[in-house]
Amino acid sequence: MAQTRILEPAENAHQYPLLIKQLLLSGPRYSPDQEIVYANRSKYTYSDLVERIHRLANALTDAGVKPGDTVAVMDWDTPRYLECFFAIPMIGAVLHTINVRLSPDQILYTMNHAEDDVVLVHDDFLPILDAIKGDIQTVKTYIQLTDESSPKSTSLDTAGEYESLLAAAATKFDFPDFDENSVATTFYTTGTTGNPKGVFFSHRQLVLHTLAMTGSLSAYDEMPLLRSSSVYMPVTPMFHVHAWGVPYAATMMGIKQVYPGRYEPELLVDLLKEHKVTFSHCVPTIMQMMMATESIKTADLSNWHVLIGGSALTKGLCDAGAKLGIRMYTGYGMSETCPLLSTTHLKPEDLELPLEQQTAKRVKTGIAVPMVEIEIVDPDGKPVPHDGEAKGEVVTRAPWLTQSYFKQPDKGEELWQGGWLHTGDVASMEPDNTLTIKDRIKDVIKTGGEWLSSLDLENLISQHPAVAGAAVVGVPDEKWGERPHALVTLKPGEQADVSDIQNHLRQFVDSGEINKWAIPEQIDFVEDIPKTSVGKINKKLIRDQLK
Amino acid sequence: MAQTRILEPAENAHQYPLLIKQLLLSGPRYSPDQEIVYANRSKYTYSDLVERIHRLANALTDAGVKPGDTVAVMDWDTPRYLECFFAIPMIGAVLHTINVRLSPDQILYTMNHAEDDVVLVHDDFLPILDAIKGDIQTVKTYIQLTDESSPKSTSLDTAGEYESLLAAAATKFDFPDFDENSVATTFYTTGTTGNPKGVFFSHRQLVLHTLAMTGSLSAYDEMPLLRSSSVYMPVTPMFHVHAWGVPYAATMMGIKQVYPGRYEPELLVDLLKEHKVTFSHCVPTIMQMMMATESIKTADLSNWHVLIGGSALTKGLCDAGAKLGIRMYTGYGMSETCPLLSTTHLKPEDLELPLEQQTAKRVKTGIAVPMVEIEIVDPDGKPVPHDGEAKGEVVTRAPWLTQSYFKQPDKGEELWQGGWLHTGDVASMEPDNTLTIKDRIKDVIKTGGEWLSSLDLENLISQHPAVAGAAVVGVPDEKWGERPHALVTLKPGEQADVSDIQNHLRQFVDSGEINKWAIPEQIDFVEDIPKTSVGKINKKLIRDQLK
């Protein structure tokens, strides 16, 4: 370690710990009257938000919550959830954002594993808890959330309803200072094998993620993502990596926020129109559903900018969006990375290009955001060339990466090797530092001694005009080791057969984008492609079914 | 202290220290071919910048610099200086930015006090060092900087010339990781009494200041301060609080940078025109000099946005700038605060207002930026009301405030009281959180039991059409305790006498802006108003002269 001049204790007496409460300072200061909207139900101002966060902190404390406790939330995307994003960590407790799309058994597992002390639960999820309550081990208190005039009945013994508790609570809470390395949030990642794993983020990490996100996303020339005049609506759930951390950044900047509640495509489009939303983040599946609505045809979406993540942004989706005026960008990250690692970065001159040429840039995984190091490495951990061709595993260093998995240090050691977090993604990097994810390491198809990207193939198949979606997995093959096997869903009313798809792929052989041996012999037309609880293609299940 | 769940060591094994080297990651990645310009002399790209920083680190190491050493720089505002901003802290040494406007005796004091090991010195400042070299105590090595084909001759024994050393150095340096609380930079503040005091900032503090600055300044609707398409030119010196920290932020975002070298008004205006500069920061004096040039009359400055600091932005200057198309904003901070604390914050609807009404908002001290707490307190440290009237001392907490003064812990204890940094400024705060600095505590005029702001009076006097500048100090008065005494400079060719100024001020009595007793009996017309080395009105000297 270099012998630098480190601040003496007396020279560092007023060190300011990085705490989530500081993210709440500037937004209400800039824009006390700015609105926070709950779908078509209600709205309030930033001043109200601050008061409600103070009331919630008092209500939770009155209900027995202490620093170090874990408080879980099961809710739709609501301003209530935003209040929990702040109040729970700000009192020194840990916010557990429960993935309500998991099976009841998995939810039970995560609640017991996280050692939840208190659970805030929306009416709609009461049946889950009613069913598993006998096996919940650590929860002492339930608080009900409702969108109706009175909460639904439940067999749970609850401490009351959220709004009533807030109304009864004092309006001022004295939020303490504490160590910035205190855990602020936790949630569970769902692999395709084994139990969910608990990732966790400290106050310091969330503050740094927010600051870097605000800087990098505001500085885009085209994207008015986080400026005073922006209007933000999340379309990835708040339980999933804190809705990518954007609610923290939006609140810090004091911009208008619209929370949609449930993800009903017609409702989402209505909210876009009514509030002139300028920025969202979304997974491709939901974007497709929104673009299939009737009402989107009459919407002016020329100011709507969308960061697409979760799975790859395809050229087809990006182009279809562009025709509606929607500007899409790829955002890359994962639960373990808080999540932001890279985004598409269009330079001022790129924005002069025709839309189709812009699309080619938008669908790339992008360039690492400030403060993030990204490298691609071979199985020995050695960097591979940045020539746009060579593939390697994406590894990263940044100030906001989860350090381990809760109570699973062995899994944490697998995640971190040689001082870098290993993402499990395979990518190439161009000389200009643009990353393009090619596959998950475990989904790469090894055929005839070559690596074939299942994502590349899915992307090309999905460009066939009749195709709605595609999934490609490797299946064992005596001669070649593995061969690609495709599942394809068709758009309503469209027709295609195996040879149509193969012929479609041949044009990309001619243009040099793929090799001839990449064309699958096996192509099945299916009703639905199996997905995980967070909407990713469940390749493990597909491989199991094909066995 | 709240008993939060602090990360266990095993849960925090991959903590990422915040280091200045990380600020250099994203700019060259986003914009490897983006230009960094040195006045009308030369330019190079971000890729070149990175290589030159590596070469400089090798050259300094070859010259004996070790982590923990102090490396001082005496240069104009140049890309060389930018290279020093990065390379010196990145090798673990401390960058001492010498204030070249101090007297040779004061420069000698700061060099000995900071314990400089190595000095990089421009030709133009060699005479200073030649004169004091016998008394310089710790410097082992001098490196010459020149803008000519060969360096000037000097009696100093130098290790060589900067460009030659870089040319001979290896192109790759392996910058180490180290404790984020290591000192990165130091420089000296000049009060009007006593020796200069050494402030210092850690890597952590500079990284956090940069991240928060980038977010807050990029998010302005009107100000394209730090976006991909911005063009940045500093017009406050790089030795003074790292040119307000903006070179770090601009480099992180990969935007075009123009370094002007010396501050010659005609040159500055030419550079604005040639490079279509969009963002600068400046003190009022230099802005006035630029606005007095012939060439500014033919410049299109409608895209030039300027953060004004150092001393108050007056309505007169802001309005005169607006007529030329220049949009000015107040930025507030001080050497001890790294410096950014607050900026004027115009909301989208404010930008619809007529220019004169915008001016009223632009000249306020503004709203605290993200992560900064600002309060105004009475002499007992108790907050005074935020009613736009009550005055109190401005105190602040933020993650980037200097913790003390180097080797003067007693002065540090005066700076920090009750956990807040005391700025010595007196201000009021409006209910919407807008701060307006009224005076320095020591410059407030106490007359007839009331506090009278010398800045308010200067601002009103300067609105007289014949007036170029004004300074007001309190002078002892038997009856009233103190009375205001004004020094006034007139614009070339303009005339005014004492009663003109007093009559001018009476309109503000009628409009209720000041009380009748605020009008000075003593008004002197002078050629020049005494200024400090950083361009602030030297009120101590004025008071001494008036005695």
Image (tube, coloured by chain):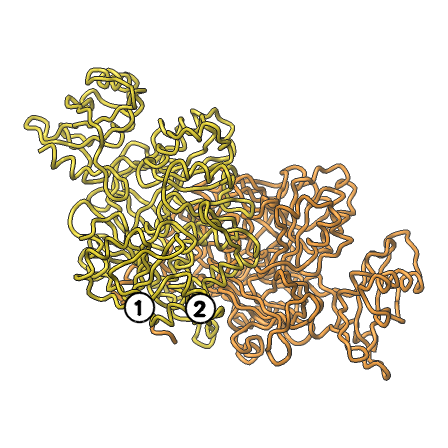
Chain colours: A orange, B yellow
Q: Is residue B109 above or below residue B317?
A: below
Q: Nearer the viewer, mark 1 or mark 2?
A: 2
Percent of width and height locating residue A474? 80, 74
Task: Say whether residue A450 is left or right of residue B486.
Answer: right
Dot 2 surroundings within 10 Å: few (below 14), some, or many (20 or more)? few
Disc 1 residue type (three-letter): Asp
Q: Is residue A471 above or below residue A360?
A: below
Task: Judge whether residue A248 can be spotted in this image.
Answer: no
Task: Judge whether residue A398 can be spotted in this image.
Answer: yes
CA–CA distance in space, label 1 to label 2: 22 Å
Residue labelled with disc 1: B69
Q: Quadrant of residue B310?
A: top left
Judging depth in this view, the residue of A135 and A418 nearest the camera is A418
**Residue at the left extreme, as displayed:** B478
Residue B487, numbered circle:
none
Task: Say whether residue B69 is left or right of residue A46.
Answer: left
Q: Quadrant of residue A15?
A: bottom left
* Dot 2: element: helix
Percent of width and height locating residue B460? 28, 25
Please report, as a chain letter, where disc 2 is located: B
Disc 2 residue type (three-letter): Ala
Count of numbered marks: 2
Q: Is residue A44 above or below residue A427?
A: above
Residue labelled with disc 2: B168
Task: Say whether residue A295 is left or right of residue B416.
Answer: right
Judging depth in this view, the residue of A134 and A207 nearest the camera is A207
Dot 1 or dot 2, earlier in sequence:
1
Percent of width and height locating residue B478? 5, 28
Judging depth in this view, the residue of B469 and A311 nearest the camera is B469
Quarter of the rendering occupied by the N terminus of chain A: bottom left
Please report, as a chain letter, where disc 1 is located: B
* Dot 1: element: loop
